[in-house]
């Protein structure tokens, strides 16, 4: 996906006209069994960001991709570009012929290609954190699910301040 396509599919909240986003949460965390997440937010101004592996839905943040013969040339080009960058970063002489053969072999082995892509994507998900917001403070499903059966809180965040100003629509 090109950056412009990503920007169109996942616009910033502020670009969608939202002035506020809402975070639903329980008073007592299921993880810590206390109010430490809430205390950190309200007293210290620290917002907890979850690792995707902590999400309750096993399909959340899982990659959805398929490789076709049409995508092979673009993937091959990407692999060669990344190999060249990696060699430069590690001060290693780039061997174009060897990299080209490796890319060709990899694209010929769909299972190996899928394993490599899955490994790379899972590494990105391990290294990043996510915080979920809603533009609607009256979302009954969110009150029920994230605010502990309507017993928790809904906190309003101003979209003009970090990190909320970087919030994007999820698809």
Image (tube, rainbow, N blue to C red):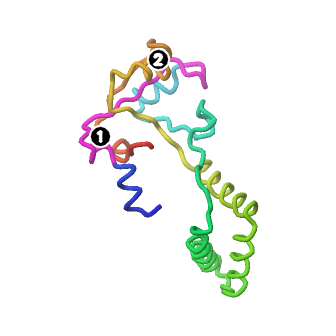
Residue 100 has which mark? none
Q: Which of pointers 2 and 1 lies earlier in the amino acid sequence?
A: 2
**Residue matched to label 2:** 144
Is 79 on the left or on the right of 14, as rendered? right
CA distance for labels 2 and 1: 24 Å
What residue is shown at x 69% (from left), y 56% (from top)?
119
Query: In this rendering, is residue 115 above or below 90?
Result: above
Q: Secondary structure at mark 1?
A: loop
Is 44 on the left or on the right of 125, as rendered? left
* Camera-nearest residue between 145 and 154: 145
| Region of the chain picked out in magenta, as a range | 12-34
* Camera-nearest residue between 46 and 137: 137
Residue 127 position, x and y percent, is 59, 50
Q: Nearer the viewer, mark 2 or mark 1?
A: 2
Residue 47 position, x and y percent, is 45, 35
- Magenta stretch, main secondary structure, is loop
What residue is shown at x 54% (from left), y 37% (from top)?
50
Q: Quadrant of the C terminus?
A: top left
**Residue matched to label 1:** 159
Residue 122 position, x and y percent, is 64, 51
Q: Secondary structure at mark 2?
A: helix
Name the quadrant containing residue 43.
top left
Residue 159 included in the magenta stretch of the image: no
């Amino acid at each position: 996906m090109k950056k412009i396509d990503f920007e169109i599919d996942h616009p910033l909240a502020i670009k969608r006209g939202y002035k506020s986003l809402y975070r639903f949460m329980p008073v007592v965390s299921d993880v810590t069994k206390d109010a430490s997440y809430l205390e950190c937010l309200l007293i210290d101004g620290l917002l907890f960001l979850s690792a995707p592996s902590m999400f309750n839905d096993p399909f959340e943040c899982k990659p959805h991709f398929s490789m076709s013969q049409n995508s092979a040339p673009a993937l091959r080009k990407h692999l060669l570009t990344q190999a060249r960058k990696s060699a430069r970063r590690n001060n290693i002489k780039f061997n174009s012929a060897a990299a080209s053969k490796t890319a060709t072999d990899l694209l010929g082995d769909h299972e190996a290609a899928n394993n490599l892509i899955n490994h790379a994507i899972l590494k990105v998900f391990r290294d990043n954190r996510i915080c979920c917001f809603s533009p609607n403070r009256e979302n009954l499903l969110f009150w029920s699910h994230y605010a502990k059966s309507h017993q928790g809180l809904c906190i309003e965040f101003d979209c003009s301040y970090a990190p909320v100003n970087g919030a994007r629509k999820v698809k």
